[in-house]
Amino acid sequence: SSRRRHTRLRTVTKFRRVLFRSLKLLGDTYQKMSDPQNAINSYKSAIEANENYDRAYYSLAKIYYNNGDTDKAIESLSKAVIVSPKYGKAYELLGTVYQDIENLDAAVENYELAIKYSKKSYSIQYRISSSYNLKKDYTEARDHAKLAIEYKRNYAPAYFELGLAEKCLGNRAAALD
């Protein structure tokens, strides 16, 4: 009897794991089909099936962000990083959302966490460089732009941020390079 209960519990646990992953994949499919409302419903259902499913929170946040609902995007991303405190992609998107709403301190803070928990990423370095340029911290902007270029030599947006930082630091010759 105890053995049967244990077997049933394992079966239910396995079913729930398949269920929340399937609901997330269904949300991804709806998103690819440009059906945000059904995608949102699927991601919410995946979260109901497993409230610790960080990727469902992230995917939900991406839809909210793409539809201009920055408050809900921040809320979903905040839940994703509570569930998975080392989730670099979530911190990167949080940084982007905060930069878009001109909360540059929060943007930089989240980009720094994204850098901490992600492998070398030219896009994160570029984004944090952009935030530092907007904050008029040109030395930090220059340093991060250089890292972005080191990670991906032909990444034109990083060259723009580097040139802007160098120009504002008074290094006109470097800005033109």
Image (spheres, grey):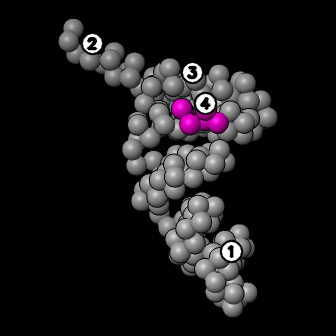
The residue at 68%/80% (across/down) is 167
Q: Secondary structure at mark 4?
A: helix
Of pointers 1 and 4, the one earlier in the residue sequence: 4
At which x and y percent is residue 87? Answer: 45, 47
Proximity of marks 3 and 1: CB atoms separated by less than 8 Å: no
The residue at 32%/17% (across/down) is 9
Residue 149: mark in rendering: none
Circle 1 sits on which residue? 164
Circle 2 sits on which residue? 5
Which residues, given as a range, are shown in magenta? 70-76
The residue at 45%/25% (across/down) is 50
Circle 3 sits on which residue? 45
Residue 135 in sight: yes
* Nearer the camera: disc 2 or disc 3: 3
Of pointers 3 and 4, the one earlier in the residue sequence: 3
Q: Secondary structure at mark 2?
A: helix
Q: Which is nearer the eye, 139 or 95? A: 139
